[in-house]
Image (cartoon, grey):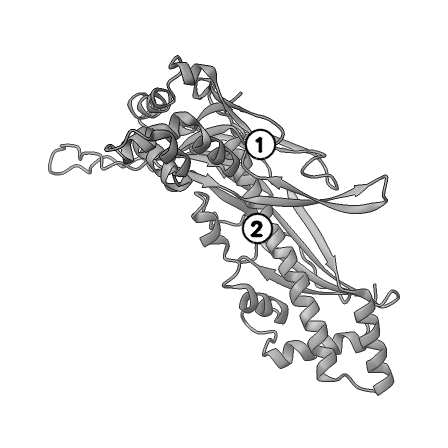
């Protein structure tokens, strides 16, 4: 890998034209990323609203630690004599588990044909035009955007998998076909995992309400209210909400049990329940269910894409995966239920690569050039994991049979 002076000139000229230089804030590439993607990709805002703010600490050691969090209540003061200090408040939780942070990498090559044509054109003209520079910088923007966006999708997928898969995160041939496997279990109490079958669903997505719900043997409202009641009364769980996947939401609101109940409550002056039930708005039904069971329902509809090599067609295929497990309802506390922990990737200044940092030094991006192949790559690397810290207050009800 030898970076040519001609190519360096194109990138440096593009950076210079856009006003990005090496300075006290970082390299020209770091400044470029901070400016170009600051609004689109904000790790703290993105993951905080998902209940997992970014941990401000970036340790040198690539390890994660699961701290059992405690809610800071307004505990009463202690009576002491006038010359004594008061007792020190307890502020820390206790460590449940520790492990190694996984490393995630991917890269995007520039369009080789475009890069080659522009370099040959520059060689023929004897200089690098602004048009050539603009094309190269556009390619770099699109490649970098794909990588950073992919990193965020990686962590959002991890978040939803951990929350919906009973505290487990599993990387296997399905969701990590080009990488190495991993399995982490953050530990959910068996007493917090229940099954109450309300419906079945065929391969075409047709939902059939369970006979127990239809006959009244199974009462979904009672089931969910009891989970919430026991969480608050026995485990002193703070105020929370339910989380479900988009497919689970569609199944819930299609059940006759919920549609008829909502319609009867919304139209107390009619007996034509069947007609009005068919016309009811799905989102209104879901909001109503939340009011009836005493906690709102939040729909998680993140999707992730993975690339896999098809050994038959000899081509790379893209598969879309649902992040949140279908058929399960998860009760979790409002607010933060964990954090995203990172360590800083190792980066050395090398003549074959320009180095840039994003997410406050948590993501390493390297722009490299292969002069022999006349091709350019942007490579991304981060070492991090979503780590829940309120697993003692996470409750699961599997409702799909």
Q: Position of residue 242 (x, y in %)?
A: 40, 33
Residue 182 falls left or right of residue 374: left
Residue 152, which numbered label? 2
Residue 181 falls left or right of residue 331: right
Q: Position of residue 346 (x, y in %)?
A: 66, 53
Residue plotted at (38% across, 22% down): 220
Of 33 and 349, nearer the camera is 33
On screen, 398 above or below 217?
below
On screen, 27 above or below 132?
above
Badge nearest the viewer, 2 or 1: 1
Q: Report whether residue 5 is seen.
A: no
Of 67 and 182, nearer the camera is 182
Report how far apart the C-alphas of labels 2 and 1 lie in the structure. Answer: 29 Å
Name which quarter of the figure residue 76 lies in. Answer: top left
Q: Are marks 2 and 1 in contact (CB under 8 Å)?
A: no
If you read the primary sequence from the N terminus, does the residue marked by circle 2 or circle 1 appear first? 2
Residue plotted at (62% across, 60% down): 145
Q: Secondary structure at mark 2?
A: helix
Q: Position of residue 182 (x, y in %)?
A: 66, 33
Residue plotted at (70% across, 51% down): 106
Q: Report whether residue 141 is seen.
A: yes
Q: Secondary structure at mark 1?
A: loop
Of 64 and 187, nearer the camera is 187
Of 35 and 303, nearer the camera is 303
Disc tally is: 2
Residue 205, which numbered label? 1
Q: Position of residue 401 (x, y in %)?
A: 53, 20
Mark 2 surroundings within 10 Å by alpha-carbon count, few (fewer than 14), some (14 through 19), many (20 or more)? some
Q: Residue furthest bottom?
A: 126
Residue plotted at (17% across, 32% down): 78
């Amino acid at each position: 890998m030898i970076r040519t002076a001609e190519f360096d000139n194109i990138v440096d000229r593009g950076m210079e034209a856009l006003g990005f230089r090496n300075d006290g804030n970082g390299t020209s590439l770091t400044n470029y990323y901070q400016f170009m993607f600051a609004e689109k990709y904000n790790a703290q805002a993105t993951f905080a609203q998902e209940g997992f703010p970014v941990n401000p600490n970036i340790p040198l050691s690539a390890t994660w630690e699961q701290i059992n969090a405690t809610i800071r209540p307004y505990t009463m003061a202690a009576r002491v004599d006038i010359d004594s200090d008061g007792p020190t408040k307890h502020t820390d939780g206790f460590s449940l588990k520790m492990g190694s942070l996984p490393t995630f990498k991917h890269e995007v090559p520039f369009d080789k044909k475009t890069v080659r044509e522009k370099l040959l054109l520059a060689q023929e003209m004897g200089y690098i035009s602004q048009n050539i520079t603009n094309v190269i910088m556009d390619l770099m923007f699109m490649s970098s955007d794909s990588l950073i966006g992919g990193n965020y999708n990686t962590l959002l997928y991890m978040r939803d998998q951990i929350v919906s898969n009973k505290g487990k995160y599993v990387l296997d041939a399905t969701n990590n076909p080009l990488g190495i496997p991993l399995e982490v279990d953050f530990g959910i109490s068996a007493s917090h995992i229940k099954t109450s079958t309300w419906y079945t669903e065929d391969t075409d997505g047709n939902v059939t309400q369970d006979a127990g719900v239809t006959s009244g043997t199974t009462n979904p409202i009672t089931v969910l209210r009891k989970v919430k009641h026991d969480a608050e009364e026995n485990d002193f769980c703070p105020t929370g909400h339910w989380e479900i996947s988009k497919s689970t939401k569609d199944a819930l609101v299609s059940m006759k049990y919920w549609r008829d109940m909502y319609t009867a409550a919304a139209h107390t002056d009619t007996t034509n329940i069947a007609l009005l039930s068919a016309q009811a708005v799905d989102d209104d039904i879901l909001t109503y269910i939340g009011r009836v069971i005493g906690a709102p329902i939040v729909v998680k509809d993140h999707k992730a894409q993975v690339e896999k090599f098809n050994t038959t067609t000899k081509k790379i295929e893209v598969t879309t995966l649902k992040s949140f497990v279908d058929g399960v309802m998860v009760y979790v506390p409002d607010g933060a239920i964990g954090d995203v922990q990172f360590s800083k990737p190792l980066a050395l200044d090398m003549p074959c690569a320009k180095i840039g940092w994003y997410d406050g030094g948590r993501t390493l991006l390297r722009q490299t050039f292969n002069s022999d192949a006349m091709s350019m790559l942007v490579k991304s690397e981060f070492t991090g994991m979503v780590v829940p810290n309120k697993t003692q207050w996470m409750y699961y009800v599997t409702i799909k049979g």
